[in-house]
Amino acid sequence: MKKFSTSTLQTHPRGRDIEKILNACIEAVEPGNAVHRFVRREKNILFIDNQPYHLDEFDNVTVLGFGKATEAMSLALLDVLASYPSRGLLIPKQAFTSPASGFDVSPGGHPVPTEVSLIAGNKAFDLVSNLTERDLLICLISGGGSALMTSPHLGLQLEDMQSLTKLLLACGARVDEINTLRRHLDRVKGGGIAKSANGARIASLILSDVVGNPLEAIASGPTAPDPTSREDALNILKKYDLLEKVPAAILQVLENVAETPKPNDPLFERVQNVLVGSNSLAAQAGLQMAKSLGFHTHFLGDTWQGEACEVAKELCGYFKRDYERPFCLIAGGETTVTITGNGKGGRNQELALAAAIEMNGLQDSMLITLATDGEDGPTDAAGAVVTGETRQRGESLGVNAQAFLSQNDAYSYFEKLDDLLKIGPTGTNVNDLTLMFGY
């Protein structure tokens, strides 16, 4: 159980209950639990979402895992496979000891791909390129996979991909837009793993970190058909006025590379993609716990997107509705931040700071933002806790909420109030949650 300890939660009469609700959200999408719900083995038959795989029919069982949940997902899968021989490549964010002989652990870089991401991506491409029709490839896919593993098309350098990613993040491009570009620039994305596997059977267990769970967007869809085109990718660059800012090689590849495999491509007849965890599942678990603790619960949906500050205003409007108290509202999704300052923070902290301004003076109310992976942006905080007194508390400590918000410096603001959620990496990632309470 994670410790959700902040100044406000420690002193609030219902702080203990709120910690239980937050923990319920995380535990519901714990990667090991997710894998065990969908995978079982009966002698030499492996069942993945009830689809049988007769292991004796394959020369090899190869595991390729990539994303923040790689360690937990791989341990759960190998627990099911037990003594059955397997081999694989695991690409996590943080290094860990190989779970078994025959497995290579090759951590990548995040949120911008680095040299180790390139090494990992090329290893993945080489691994699947050596498979045959008599092999079974089990992919373990989770959030962060797009950056942790990259193998750019011929003509592109790592620096080109890094530059593009930084430009897209800075201008507030949505995750699905960023992944549309990645799918058309990378050999292992946009169905690239499926395309390169030489007809091997593929089963992918997918923990979604993308709003709405489109398979092509999760880790840029390495085993999923790509419904977008090169023209779509170019239009995203036009939308954010980046055509003259991105490296020239990016445009050259987008104009000349072969299209990604589409939904009607027969290669996907040998691919099974299974969604094992999502934002909605985490939210529903939190609501169920809240209900058991006496809260009136309401789910506000899992498709919240847009600028964090604007989403904060819209969400805070729910405090004005006539909900029976005590209530717990949960909204899911993933916002963006257009960076104009040089402060420290992430989208969840930015949303929380904007909410602190909106909620100023509001009685008996609380808002909590939570990155389900435990890491909001390039920080060690998962989010922050806000009440109607937050802004006044800041003023008493000599910090102005609006000034810090204008510098995108929410981390520093909430650090001074001791209201940052610091729970450490959770090993999962299913987007973000905003929880709202009224007493």
Image (cartoon, rainbow, N blue to C red):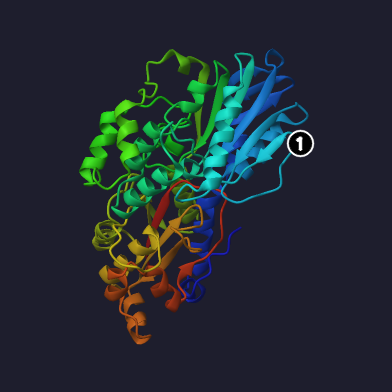
Q: Nearer the viewer, residue 320 or 379?
A: 379
Vertical relation: 30 (above or below) 315? above
| Residue with the most extreme right position | 83
**In this figure, which residue is indicated by the disc labeled 1?**
101
Vertical relation: 378 (above or below) 98? below
**Amino acid under label 1?**
Ser
**Quadrant (top left/top right/bottom left/bottom right) for the C terminus:** bottom left
Residue beneath the point at 53% across and 47% down? 115
Residue 29 visible in the snapshot: no
Q: Nearer the viewer, residue 409 or 318?
A: 409
Going by the image, does 341 lie left or right of 93? left
Residue density around tag 1, few if under 14, some if 14–19, many if 20 or more, within 10 Å: few
Residue beneath the point at 49% across and 39% down? 150
Going by the image, does 205 lie left or right of 385? right
Residue 83 at what x, y percent from top left? 78, 29
Residue 379 at what x, y percent from top left? 47, 63
Residue 28 at what x, y percent from top left? 54, 46
Residue beneath the point at 29% across and 52% down? 172
Count of numbered circles in the view: 1
In the picture, residue 397 is in which quadrant? Answer: bottom left
Going by the image, does 143 lie left or right of 77? left
In the picture, residue 321 is in which quadrant? Answer: bottom left
Residue 14 at what x, y percent from top left? 47, 69
Residue 219 visible in the snapshot: yes
